Image (cartoon, rainbow, N blue to C red):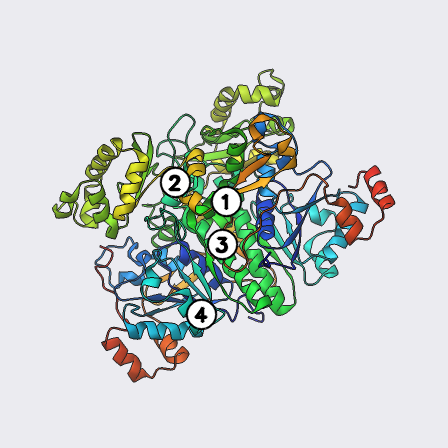
Amino acid sequence: MSYRLPLAGVRILDLTMAWAGPYATRLLADMGAEAIKIEAADNWDLARSLHFLGHETERWYNKSAFFNHLNRNKLACALDLSQARGRELFLGLVEKSDVLIENLRPGALEGLGLTYETMCAARPDIILVSMPGHGKGGPESDYITCGTHVEQLSGLTSLTGYAGGEPRKSGISYGDPVAGIAAAGAVAAALLYRRRTGRGQHVEVAQRETMTNLIGEFVVGYSMNGRQPPRLGNRHRSMAPHGAYPCAGEDRWVALAVGSDDEFAGLCRAIGWPDLASDPRFADVVSRYRHQDEIDAIISEWSRNRTPEEAGQALQQEGVAASPVLSIPQLMDDPHLRARDFFESVSHAEAGVWDMDGVAWRCSGTPAHVRLPAPCFAEHNRYVFGELLGLSTAEIESLEEDGVIGSAPLLTLHD
Amino acid sequence: MSEGALEGVTVLELSEGVSGPFCGKLLAAYGAEVIKVEPPGGDPARRHGPFPDDIPHSERSALFLYLNTGKLGVTLDIGKATGARLLERLVLQADVLVENLPAGRLESLGLGYRELAAMNSRLLMTSVSPFGRRGPYADRRSTNLTSFAAGGQMYLTGDPGREPLQNGGYQADYQAGLNAFSATVTGLIGVAASDAGQHIDVSAMECQAAILEAFLPDYAYRRSEALTKRRGNFSSAVIGLYPCEDGYLGIHAMPRQFAALARTMGLEWMLEDERFRYNRSRLRHDDELAAHFYAWCAGQRREEAYARAGELRAPLAYVHTLADLTTSPQLQARDYFQRIDYPEARAAGKSASAGGRLTYPGPLFRLSEAPARAGRAPLLGEHNEEIFGGRLDLGRGDLVRLRANGVI
């Protein structure tokens, strides 16, 4: 590699677990930061347990695909912060780092005596990033938030659902990666600030607050009109037709969206019924909106006999926004993603070889890749405690014996 | 006022709709000077509601007002040679260009990355688009819905046996814009370190495909389709949305949190029962577990259940409506919402007459040393004189000529 990645030379201590925090540090590690994950024998990343392999699998905690996708390009060590000696070593690492990022429950770090001030004493310009669900302070700050709670608290879930039906959750725990992407941006912003002023700071990413940023127009709209908009299914407030239509095959669909008269004429040509564009029921935006049940039935009749790819292509050729609703196997085989080399083959010492989604921020001058597979539990203890902190092998071994440095995870932790 | 994190960074935003403008809005919030370049007819987002009293008005669109806070606004027809020349002059003074125009549009005007980088080698250009700027789908037409379909999230959302479902608002576009923001700020560190700009290509499809929870990783690794189907409101009994007396309760419990959940619901006996004691045994009795949760939730009022769960540290929340958000004691205690004065909203009649101020979500994240800024969105062409006159040294007569020729 003849270029420097944007975050080369930045060291991040990563106390985060599960998804939101690790996604933030994955993005930063992809961009060249050295991210060191700190786990402990009795406090290791939950994502290691979500492996779907059966507990008979040997060393399953190193083979979780979820964990291994989220933690590529990172290093890992194991250190017990509940012991004084562990905290001492930890502060030694803080001294040698630019960023510390954590998503422990509020007050947990402080409870160990690891306040922002303590960290500043070790490293005056440290950037501390906290990712609580509710933020510090306020009556709910100690409430547990987990996965799908963030989108429920943000307002998004109340807006999602089939027309006339109950709210629906997203297919993923959407608040997690959203907070992670935001936190990565926050780290970068704080690094730029430090570069200019020499000062570190404490960054707070309150996950529910972050997520509400992605439905801002509804918040502003509510302050205009005081109304909760109805759930629309796949429909749109002004475009019609707008939805997902059944195609040939099991659970296969094509999504399309039509706004203008020209686009509707294109749709009519694509379905082989050009005259439909001048049918008085559908001839203008307002009529189409009023008669969208009828249009939907006509489109479904057409799409049912075609694959989503055929339908999508026919519509695109006539200038209509359309796409197959891609399932995961289809995404992984998708010719466009493959042509862009989105998936990268990864080789992991214990988990083997497979294709992983690559780096979504495509930088022309400093293209980034999966450089390292995700770390096995405590894989980089020697580097972290030996090279960075200067401990001898004998000292590391003795700390392992005392349980300050961890070497194997407590298997029953997440049962 | 304290200095913003992105103080001194000048951004040109050549974007419409949601994705690029969201990126620009965030850059502005953290201290960059963002100049939004709109076509003389305005960003199409201005035509989308909600509007006060449902009366369309290009200066009163909630979508536009929200997505363009804190920016300066100029109009410019870059399709005209004169407009393209003026844009080039703005690029010379800019650190960042954020664009989400239709594929090929900038290249066809001689304003592609290559040409712009030749003029300003430190330029960081961020393109945010449905499919990315290269590859077989780069020229495809797409809206938020079709982008959401292409990214894999739609297939996973909604009920088994029904059509896949989009989620509320413009989530494919927002995700792309959020990624573009974080990628741009990261890219600026690279520019500072190397003195060289570059082109960042952000594809909504890839941004989504990267965050398919454990579902894509598991398929990628095991090639099993076990986790590739949508499952409505219930991934399992412990990850689900349950109706309650006055709304919906969300349960999302990791194995270690089950005991607190059982205590909250008065189901402590489960902790001693072989069927429910361990995660693996619970999974075998999932329907039974769900039935108990249903029954308990049905008799609960949302705020009381939430408060009780909070006290007992159980993983339960309720679905907040927009009204719940604006009255949330937590968000109020955190002083989350921003009230932004807006001259056009003040004129907009009764429902927005509370001093002409509207309520906006607060910052994406909070920086202790460099708090985010709030400021209203620009009126169409509001800063034409300041930018074209002040920055490009055009005289008043020049601006009149540009206006007469439809350039601004």
Say if labels 2 and 1 share a chain: yes
For mark 1, name the chain.
Answer: A
Q: Name the element at disc 4.
A: helix
Numbered disc in front, either 1 or 4: 4
* Quadrant of the frame with the N terminus of chain B: bottom right
Q: Position of residue B376 (x, y in %)?
A: 62, 43
Say if labels 1 and 4 share a chain: yes
Q: Which residue is labeled 1 in the image? A: A213
* The quarter of the displayed image where residue B102 is located: top right
Residue B388 as seen in the image, left or right of residue A324: right
Q: Position of residue A113 (x, y in %)?
A: 34, 67
Marks 3/4: CA distance?
A: 19 Å
Marks 4/2: CA distance?
A: 36 Å
Three-letter amino acid code at the position of disc 1: Asn
Give the residue displayed 44% in from the left and 51% down from the top: A179
Judge whether A122 appears above or below B317 on screen. below
Q: Name the element at disc 1.
A: helix
Q: Position of residue A393 (x, y in %)?
A: 31, 83
Q: Which residue is labeled 3 in the image? A: B366
Marks 3/1: CA distance?
A: 13 Å
Say if labels 3 and 2 share a chain: no
Q: Which residue is labeled 4 in the image? A: A120
Question: Which of the two residues, A286 or A53, is positioned nearer the viewer here?
Answer: A286
Marks 2/1: CA distance?
A: 14 Å
